[in-house]
Amino acid sequence: MSGSPPTVYEQHWNETWYSFHRALRSPDEFNAFVWLFRLARGFAGYVYFKSGAYKVGTHRWWRSVVPAFGIGLICAVVLSYYWTLRPVIIQRWCCPLNRGPDAPCEDKGCRWSSFHDLFVFYLGMIIVFHYLSACFQSPGVALAARYNELESTQDVPEGLVWDSLDSRGGCCCFGPKIDVAMEKKRVARYQEGKLSKLKASTNSFPDVEWTKCKKCNITRPPRCHHCSVCNRCILRFDHHCVWLNNCIGQNNYRSFLLTLFSLTTGCWYGVLMLWFPFYEPLKAQVQQHGWHFLYENKTGFLNLPPPGTLLKGLYTTGLEPEIVIKLVFPLLASVGLLQAVFLSYHIRYLVLARTTLEYKIILERQYLALVERNEICPTPHNPFDQGWMNNVKDVLGPIPLLVLLPLPVAADPESRGDPKKAA
């Protein structure tokens, strides 16, 4: 509903409320958690409309600011290493453990300090590169009828643009450009390639047939779905990512996957570097003062000063390394754990040649079969599965080591469905 008229919020709340009453009277199973979420979301939209806050346009611009926040957070963590944490790391890795407390410590000739300096810069660069690539790349779009009538990108009239405010990629006021010729070529390759010759079996999913999108008024290729957020039909639609302000599809799934991988690697590398500088003072504090969750009397968990003092120190004298470690370490650990979970799911999807949406549909069908008919529904055959090795090459490219370099590798739909070409 990001680009919808304000009256849609009121209509959505009314429909949600009526559906809630029907669900209460229905003999079907009532999921309280699902309805709490739906009611809260609908009521928030209703209050947003009635309060007049929609006039500011928050429902349009907030999504486009999220990637800037993510990039800023990544850069802040990387810069905190060079500005504040580097002496702590050098002391841990380059100084003798049995030196006196007043003995100076220098990193002259220490190979570990050079390694950490270069590796932190490399991780920060590779994360930002893949993050921006996934954010600004086209996910692969089956163009709507008004775009299909155009011959080239130069013919795109004013107003028919992929605006970042409409969650169609990009950040803030910078949006990606429409490459009409390339988008048409991606769709045409489905007809030219072996996908057009695939035949569906009795128990296969996803479907290999072309479908009709009533919203875009086009006939779209297999595995192409309409995104309700950015209002486009996305080739090999996976999901719409709020953090990237873009859909994840055939053309930018590689960048998205490498963003998850590099971000997970960077977070856990930081956790390993900061584990002892974080754990040892915390252990001594708990032994001396006991366990306190809050920082009341400055003896609580993490022993952090109040937020006002933190902001004042940040803009004046700077923060002490101990405070920066207590701020950065929990952030890296929590984000690293969350990204590791997401990465594990997408590695599974990558190996099985599935998408997030397809896997969700399969789980819903199996759940309904178990609840309604009390039978176990087997996992359907995937006609697009070429074997795990070819599935990986199909997304990441034929040369695996290129994932370590900040280089764009375009998806090649011509090889899909043909193991010999994919190899």
Image: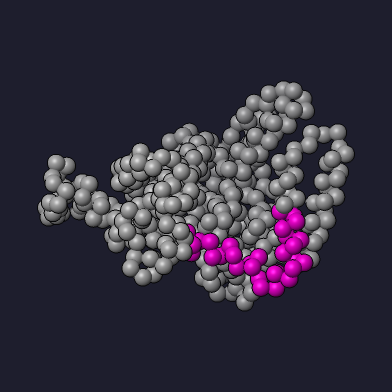
Res. 46 in view = yes
Q: Residue furthest top?
A: 375
Would you place residue 273 above or below residue 324 in this image?
above
Left or right, 118 with respect to 392, comes to left
Would you place residue 227 above or below residue 146 in this image?
above
Quarter assignment of residue 315? bottom left
Quarter assignment of residue 98? top left
Residue 281 image position (x, y, % from top left): 32, 45
Q: Residue at x 72, y 58 (%)?
A: 44
**Pick the front one: 272 or 400:** 272
**Pick the front one: 109 or 359:** 109
Residue 92 image position (x, y, % from top left): 22, 46
Q: Residue at x 41, y 48 (%)?
A: 299
Magenta segment, prevailing SS (helix, strand or loop)? helix
Res. 150 in view = no
Left or right, 201 with respect to 50, comes to left
Residue 395 image position (x, y, % from top left): 46, 46
Residue 415 image position (x, y, % from top left): 48, 45
Where is the N terminus found, in terms of image quarters?
bottom right
Picture colour scheme: one colour
Left or right, 135 with respect to 98, comes to right
**Pick the front one: 393 or 18:** 18
Instruction: Please state the extent of the stretch shown in magenta in the rendering.
Output: 41-70
Q: Residue at x 60, y 68 (%)?
A: 61
Look at the image and say whether residue 293 sits in the magenta stretch.
Answer: no
**Pick the front one: 248 or 185:** 248
Q: Residue at x 73, y 49 (%)?
A: 38
Q: Residue furthest bottom?
A: 158
